[in-house]
Image: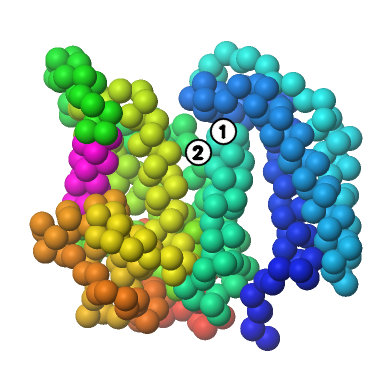
Amino acid sequence: MEPTRLKIGEGIISGYVSIFLAILSLLGILCFKFPEYLTTSDLRNVYSPKMVETLMLFSIISSFGFALLSFYLSNKKKHAVIAMTLCFSAILLGGFTVEGRSVEKANWSLGLDWLLLDLFLMVLIFVPLELAFPKNKKQTKFHSEWRTDLLYFTISHLLIQFFGIVSQKPAVAFFGWLNLGVLHTWVQSLPFFIELFLALFLTDLFQYWAHRFFHTNLYLFKFHAIHHSTRNMDWLAGSRTHFVDIFVVRSMSFIPLYVMGFSTITFSVYIVFIAIHAVLIHANTRVNFGVLRYIITTPQYHHWHHCKEPEFYGKNFAVVFPFIDMIFGTYYLPKNTWPKGTGLEETDFPKGFVKQMIYPFKTSPFNNPLPKNEKSQR
Ligand SMILES: [Zn+2]
Ligand SMILES: [Zn+2]
């Protein structure tokens, strides 16, 4: 049976929200207990212990509130019972009394704090947006492979430090010998918005060519095709990106950031903007941003990049500025039409994160039909 969309007032959404917040709280407690290994040094500079303590308190109390609401509204008490059990576990483990403490910068750590904060923020922004203004109404939140995409999201966030270090290597190797001090001083003296525009434009320009190269080189396209295997676009779909793809594109995009040496504030705003915008352009939402969509890329713009109709393949490589595609002749944005669907026709991808990671190394999705039950549905 086709699952139906979630509706307000049935107690199902409150049940899910409650379970979600309780799981975040439980994992958050681990961050408080083992900050050396589970939190990110750069992020610790952004939030204060007081902020995360308050967030934890808010999360447990809200989870409890939503569990009560779900219990009251829903005929099925299962979600409320699970959520309350998780809530009590969080309280027993010290969720109300956790205290943030300062820690020395460790050699390595997992970005569990980055994962929890970003997941919380993305769910807060995009789940209501997709519920209220969906593009594809038939698509539900919990389609068959959402766990795979969540795993991509989780692993790429946990390994933030590792990805960061590795993707900085090429820029340092190629440009580290240059004396860039004078350029950095000049860049940092520019007005904020010009600096921000330069950061977004130059990284998008480098990203554009790396991305386009992944499309034109058949060997590399096998890796990038994993990102294009998504049949149901949503806010989590963008996370489905092969590690080889992430390394190369991030390394390329880091080159202008390294060479130009933008100021800390510009760099921080750039990171936040990219983190939200990259999720937005994949989202299952019909919100179309009026004339703004000719200035900055939107879901409609990037959905065309993912379109399943072969005659429109190879368009819209830019992820921030459509004018970059206009300059290089790959721009495509009809007024109000959207692609009939997304994903690559006549390809086979295995289901699951591990199989998808290995697949492009071993074989090509373009000439290896899998048995039907092994095929990804997306
Ligand atoms: Zn692409
Ligand atoms: Zn994409």
Badge 1 amino acid: Leu
The number of discs equals: 2
Q: Nearer the viewer, residue 25 or 351?
A: 25
- Residue depicted at x 38% and y 65%: 288
In magenta stretch: residue 26: no
Position of 362 with respect to 198 (left or right) is right
Could you tell me residue 241's position as x and y percent? 41, 55
Q: Is residue 31 left or right of residue 45?
A: right
- Residue at image position (76%, 59%) is 14
Q: Quadrant of residue 142?
A: bottom right
Asked which quadrant contains residue 345, the reply is bottom left
Residue 370, relative to residue 195: is it above or below?
A: below
Query: On the image, numbered disc 1 is attached to which residue?
Result: 110
- The image shows residue 159 at horizontal and vertical percentages of 50, 38
Q: Is residue 229 visible?
A: yes
C-alpha distance separating marks 2 and 1: 6 Å
Task: Find out if the beta carbon at label 2 lies less than 8 Å from the nearest ligand 2 atom.
Answer: no
The image shows residue 92 at horizontal and vertical percentages of 89, 35
Residue matched to label 2: 159
- Give the magenta part as a residue range: 196-211
Q: Position of residue 112 (x, y in %)?
A: 60, 36
Location of the N terminus by quadrant is: bottom right
In contact (CB < 8 Å): disc 2 and disc 1: yes
- Circle 1: element type: loop
Q: Is residue 378 left or right of residue 187?
A: right
